[in-house]
Amino acid sequence: MTTRLWFLRRLDLFEGMSDAEMERLGSLLRMRSCRSGLDVVVRPPGDRIYIVKVGRVRVLQGDVAVAVLGPGQLFGTSALFGATATRQRVVAVDDVVVCDAPAAQFLGAMATHPRLAAKVAMVLARQLFELEQVVERTASDPAATRLAAKVAMVLARQLFELEQVVERTASDPAATRLAELLLRVARRDGAWTAVEGMSEADLARMIGASRETVSRLVADWERRGIVRGRPRLIELADEAALQRLSAGPGDS
């Protein structure tokens, strides 16, 4: 723990956090090393965010290198938006040490520390700028240009969504965020509307809450006839009620 706290205090990313807050964040971090040339992460699973502690890593999307990241920089940021997996591959340029933390708890820290949220946004913005340079360098290769441009668009969308996610996590109750999410991602087929292929843990990551909170809300809404839940499927039985819940406590 002492080593992790020393590392966090050295990072501008966590400037302004108290020792107690640093300790809470440090308790979430898992530290590991990787030799140069080896894969650090292949297809990040979507439930953790990664911070480079020592050395550099190269982020690949297909065969295109979209970023080289150093100490204090982040990867796996798709996890902040509920992605269950990515097609990224991350390779150690040097001998590296990386820390990773559960995305939901990291998002919660961002929600209560606006300075941290702003700095994460700056990291994403810098990576977006670097991707623009990648697009320029690969202009002679149409396939590589298209892929780099597509990744840049994804990163730009993440930067925009980050502000919304942090704002909702900081200000809206979990019930409001969950109701809004179910309405937004549900698939509609005639009179049948449902969210398919997502676990309660996936939903929890997307709204910055614990799995237990989502489980409790879904069970309550089942008792009230608002949803019908099965493993990796939630049928929206009463969309009007969910609309009221998504509007906030005053309308539920």
Image (cartoon, rainbow, N blue to C red):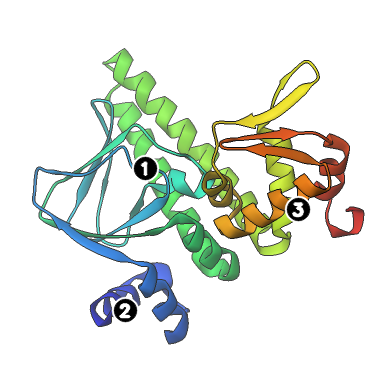
Disc assigned to residue 45: 1
In percent of the image, x 40 and y 67: which residue is there? 13
- Between the C-alphas of marks 2 and 3, the distance is 40 Å
| Disc 3: CA contacts within 10 A as few (<14), some (14-19) or many (>=20) | few
- Percent coordinates x, y for residue 157 in the rendering: 54, 38
- Between the C-alphas of marks 1 and 3, the distance is 29 Å
- Percent coordinates x, y for residue 84 in the rendering: 45, 39
First in residue order: circle 2 vs circle 3: 2
Label 3 secondary element: helix
Callout 2 amino acid? Leu
First in residue order: circle 1 vs circle 3: 1
Q: Is residue 150 above or below residue 168?
A: above
User: To which quarter of the image does residue 243 belong?
Assistant: top right
The residue positioned farthest toward the bottom in the image shown: 19
Q: Pointer 2: what residue?
A: 5
Callout 1 amino acid? Pro
Image quarter in which the N terminus is found: bottom left
Mark nearer the viewer, 2 or 3 = 3
First in residue order: circle 2 vs circle 1: 2
Label 2 secondary element: helix
Q: Pointer 3: what residue?
A: 220
In percent of the image, x 43 and y 77: which residue is there? 24
Residue 68 left/right relative to 183: left
In percent of the image, x 33 and y 71: which residue is there? 11
Q: Is residue 39 above or below residue 191?
A: below
